[in-house]
Image (cartoon, rainbow, N blue to C red):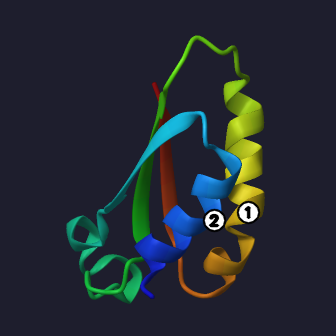
């Protein structure tokens, strides 16, 4: 299972009231800090609300960063989060 799949599995359990899109942007950072562009080090997550629920953006960012702590410890370098 690659990093995108692991992240999808982890976040899908917690954010079932959002559509989840995970994009690997590592190729855009090739050469930055020795990054090859092939290692799923720069990930963008887009969460889109499925309904009219209210939510706190800062709390969602905190939860995502906490849930992905193991990924950061194993090579994830950058995480961009967009909530729509």
The residue under the point 51% across, 44% down is: 81
Is 16 or 63 nearer to us in this picture?
Answer: 16
Callout 1 secondary element: helix
The label number, if any, that marks residue 25 in the structure image: none
Q: Which residue is mark 2?
A: 10
Q: Nearer the viewer, mark 2 or mark 1?
A: 2
The residue under the point 56% across, 67% down is: 9
Assess disc 2: are there few (<14), some (14-19) or many (≥20) residues with their C-alpha within 10 Å of its C-alpha.
some
Is 68 or 72 nearer to us in this picture?
Answer: 68
Q: Position of residue 14 (x, y in %)?
A: 70, 50
Q: Position of residue 55 (x, y in %)?
A: 70, 21
Residue 39 picture quarter: bottom left
Is 16 or 39 nearer to us in this picture?
Answer: 16
22 vs 82: above or below? below
Q: Position of residue 47 (x, y in %)?
A: 48, 38
Is 5 or 23 nearer to us in this picture?
Answer: 5
Q: Quadrant of the N terminus?
A: bottom left
The residue under the point 54% across, 17% down is: 51
Q: CA distance from mark 2 to mark 1?
A: 7 Å
Left or right: 23 as drawn, with respect to 8 = left
9 vs 38: above or below? above
The residue under the point 45% across, 74% down is: 5
Q: Quadrant of the C terminus?
A: top left
Left or right: 26 as drawn, with respect to 79 = left
Instruction: Please say if the residues under marks 2 and 1 sit with CB atoms less than 8 Å apart.
Output: yes
The label number, if any, that marks residue 67 in the structure image: 1
Callout 2 secondary element: helix
């Amino acid at each position: 299972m690659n990093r995108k799949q692991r992240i999808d599995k982890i976040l899908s359990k917690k954010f079932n009231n959002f559509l989840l899109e995970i994009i690997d942007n590592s190729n855009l950072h090739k050469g930055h800090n020795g990054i090859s562009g092939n290692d799923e080090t720069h990930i963008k997550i887009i969460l889109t609300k499925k309904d009219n629920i209210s939510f706190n953006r800062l709390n969602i960012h905190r939860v995502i960063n906490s849930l992905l702590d193991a990924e950061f410890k194993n090579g994830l370098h950058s995480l961009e989060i967009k909530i729509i």
